[in-house]
Image (cartoon, rainbow, N blue to C red):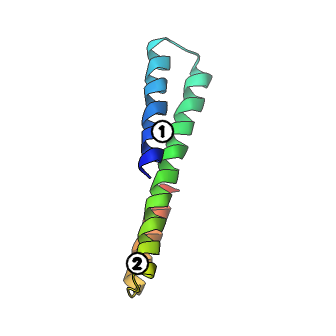
Amino acid sequence: MVNRVKRAQGQLAGVLRMVEEGRQLDDVLNQLKAVTRALERAGFAMITADLRRQVANGEDITESDLDTYERHFLSLS
């Protein structure tokens, strides 16, 4: 997850350079979409890792937990 966020950070720095250089709008927006997707994927990975940790530790997963996970997933989509 850390690598995903660092990659997105690098992509965002690239977007900033593109804006400062006055690059074409389409090019900047394409890179901005890539950053957004990278951050969403990092979020999905974090949610999934937490759920896996809970299952691996044999913790009970309540209906409330499932609602929270669902809310987290939906907030990223």
Amino acid type of the residue tagged 1 in the rendering:
Arg
- Label 1 – label 2 distance at C-alpha: 27 Å
| Chain-order first, disc 1 or disc 2 | 1
Contact? badges 1 and 2 (CB < 8 Å) = no
Q: Is residue 19 above or below residue 33?
A: above
Above-or-below relation of 67 to 58: above
Q: Residue placed at 39% from the left, 81% from the top?
A: 57
Would you name the residue on which mark 2 appears? 54
Position of residue 62 relative to residue 75, above or below, is below
Q: Residue at x 57, y 21 (%)?
A: 25
| Residue beneath disc 1 | 7
Count of number-bearing discs: 2
Residue 77 placed where, x, y %?
53, 56
For the point 50% across and 12% down, the residue is 22
Depth order, front residue of 67/49:
49
Foreground residue, 27 or 9?
9
Label disc, if present, on residue 22 of the rendered structure: none
- At label 2, the amino acid type is Gln
**Mark 2 neighbour class, 10 Å CA radius: few under 14, some 14 to 19, many 20 or more:** few
Q: Position of residue 15 (x, y in %)?
A: 48, 25
Q: Residue 68 falls in which quadrant of the image?
A: bottom left
What percent of the width, then of the height, locates residue 34? Answer: 56, 38
Residue 30, percent from left and from top: 60, 31
